[in-house]
Image (tube, rainbow, N blue to C red):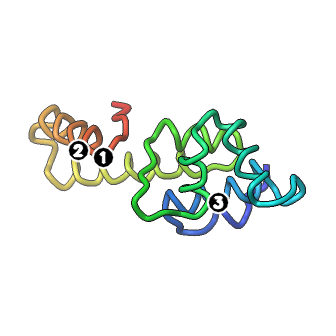
Amino acid sequence: MRKTRVEKSDMSTVEFCQSALRERIAPPSIGSVKQRIVYAARKTGWSHTRVRDLWYADPRISIKAEQLFHIEALSGLEYARQELRKNDAAIERATALLGGEDTHLIRTLVAAVFSAIGLRDRA
């Protein structure tokens, strides 16, 4: 699959989800914005309000890792996996910088941070 403009850009998670909803999950060919939001809500299984907030990129909304994977699977785009690869690489660099003195402690701290922000540590 060829990479699209969405996959190559450095956009936030909310911007990625907004773009995926508008361009891939509920494209303009469906009809009006209201119809597209209703269609996207049915397709994702989320509430109308949640989809509407994502559609308009409400800055108060947060996206959990599972939701990002769901959007990625529905749209066929690769964003979440890129983010996880970046996070894994950052963890490896941090571990190398610390000299790997106590990697179990480091992994535990990283897992706690990931848990706090809603991501799963895949270690």
| Badge number at residue 113 | 2
CB under 8 Å between callouts 2 and 1? yes
- Amino acid identity at mark 3: Glu
Residue 108: x %, y % from top left: 18, 34
For label 2, the SS is helix
- Res 93 label: none
Query: Mark 3 packing: few (<14 Cα in 10 Å), some, or many (20+)?
Result: some
Q: Quadrant of the C terminus?
A: top left
Q: Which residue is mark 1?
A: 117
Whichever of callouts 2 and 3 sits on the residue coming sooner in the sequence is 3
Q: Which of the 4 image quarters holds residue 81?
A: top right
Q: Amino acid at mark 1?
A: Ile
Name the residue at 53% across, 51% down. 82
78 horizontally vs 62: left or right: right
Q: Nearer the viewer, mark 3 or mark 1?
A: 1
Q: CA distance from mark 3 to mark 1?
A: 22 Å
